[in-house]
Image: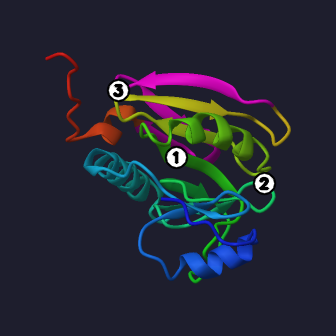
Amino acid sequence: MDVAPPTPWTAEQFLAWVGTQEGRFEFDGARPVAAAGLNAQHNRITGNICMALRARLRGAACAFYGPGLAVRTVGEKVRLPDALITCTQFPDTALVAPDVVVVFEVTSQASEHTDRIEKVREYALMPSLRRYVIVETAFAGLFVLHREAADAPWTATTLTDQDTLDLPDVSLRIPVSEFYEDVEFSRVGA
């Protein structure tokens, strides 16, 4: 359910408000929007991503953060990716991660348009971002958008659970199958 404030908010007003709320919200530049599609499978995949990143980044210069830490994209918009990596240190009290290098979004039927259209455009405008990883929930697969420089266009790569996700910007290689441990996909018509 969307929350409609009487007048448009700023990102700062949203960030002050969201810390007092139950559930997850993003900010579309004018109003809070409740995060959609957070079922058990989405939660399990997100947890697997976080475990894979945590295990590999422990003690490294870059750090991962799971759901709950925000990213400023373009204008006043604030997104809450399912996982992110930044190589910039910042206070533990911060609500927004600076200089994000990699973002993971786990799809849901309700969030597909936002994840595949709106966020692709917004994340492209973040100078620090090098990889946007869209993680499927209907099947084991990733759609990875990557670029070498801030002003370069995205290049797309698709991966299955037989492949390895390369994140050279943070010196990581992760088998895609790790993101789908203990995940069962329902069969249509079975």
Q: Residue furthest top?
A: 189
Tag 2 secondary structure: loop
Is residue 90 visible to us here? no
Amino acid type for the residue under numbered disc 1: Phe
Kindly identify which numbered label has been placed on residue 161. Answer: 3
Left or right: 156, with 29 as reference point: left
Cβ–Cβ under 8 Å for marks 2 and 1? no
| Mark positioned earlier in the residue sequence (1 or 3) | 1
Residue 158 percent across, percent down from the top left: 51, 22
From which residue to which does the magenta span run? Answer: 153-174
> Neighbour class for label 2 at 10 Å: few (<14), some, many (≥20)?
some
Discs 2/1, front:
2
Q: Residue at x 75, y 68 (%)?
A: 8
Discs 1/3, front:
1
Kindly identify which numbered label has been placed on residue 104. Answer: 1
Is residue 112 visible to us here? yes
Amino acid type for the residue under numbered disc 3: Asp
Q: Is residue 27 above or below residue 12?
A: above
Cβ–Cβ under 8 Å for marks 1 and 3? no
Amino acid type for the residue under numbered disc 2: Val
Q: Nearer the viewer, residue 164 or 48?
A: 48
Tag 3 secondary structure: loop
Discs 2/3, front:
2
